[in-house]
Image (tube, rainbow, N blue to C red):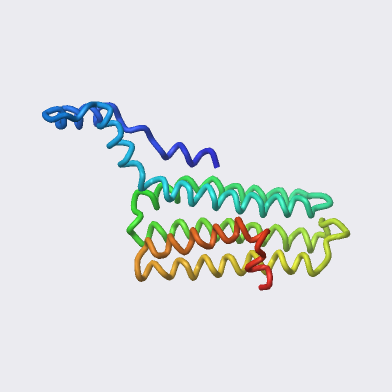
Amino acid sequence: MTLLVLDLRVPATGVVHQQHALWTSGSLRSEQVVWHALGALAPRLLPYLMSFLTLGIFWVGQQAQFNAFARSDRNLTWIHLAFLLAVTLMPFSTSLLAEFISFRLALVVYWLNLLALGVMLFVSLRYATRAELLKADVGASTRAASERRIVVYQALYAICLLFCVINTYVSIAFIVLLQLNSAISPRLRLLDRF
């Protein structure tokens, strides 16, 4: 999650000085040039915050799975390493979306990253169930609810993606709303009935 911030780069001083030279003819000061340069970074903040929330949601999901495991084995470890691979791709898909936020392909790449994260959590849970790695008190209904939650959210992410036919910003708005629901739903239980 902390790697995401590496994409928020400080404006190059050469660019700030060039802008300052262009703007010094009036009452503008160098401080205003820095504010302008920081303002230019604002569109990158939305994908950054969205991805931070996304990784937080998946991290909570992974931690919930870890709490359900009685033990682990080599295969489960490799599955979680594949999950981490999807996590490490998040800064790239976030950067791509931030740079090309109005392009559908950038949104599709971002969604594919979300899909990879969801698939790996689902595979982890299925494998742990089949390999009998779960705690004895984790019943079939709890496992089924966890699997359903992953599948429903992945389907909803796909539906959110389809809104990019209208506009990518509409898609992004629905993704953010879905993520906020996911972050709040442990209290509200909006999608737990699925």
Name the side, left or right, on which 100 lies relative to 182: left
Total labels drawn: 0
* Quadrant of the drawing holding the C terminus: bottom right
Answer with the quarter of the image where residue 102 lies.
bottom left
Answer with the quarter of the image where residue 153 lies.
bottom right
- Which residue occupies 34% across, 41% down? 41
Image coordinates for residue 146, horizontal then vertical, percent: 71, 64
Image coordinates for residue 6, horizontal then vertical, percent: 45, 36
Q: Residue furthest left?
A: 25
Name the side, left or right, on which 16 lies relative to 171: left
Q: Nearer the viewer, residue 64 or 132?
A: 64
Q: Residue furthest right?
A: 136
Q: Nearer the viewer, residue 192 or 108?
A: 192
Above or below, 161 against 1 in this view is below
- Can residue 166 be seen in this snapshot? yes
- Can residue 79 be seen in this snapshot? no
Image coordinates for residue 16, horizontal then vertical, percent: 25, 30
Above or below, 166 against 71 in this view is below
Name the side, left or right, on which 125 lies relative to 12: right
Name the side, left or right, on which 59 lies relative to 75: left
Q: Residue furthest bottom?
A: 194
- Which residue occupies 20% across, 32% down? 19
* Quadrant of the drawing holding the N terminus: top right
Q: Nearer the viewer, residue 130 or 163?
A: 163
- Which residue occupies 78% across, 65% down? 142
Image coordinates for residue 144, horizontal then vertical, percent: 74, 69
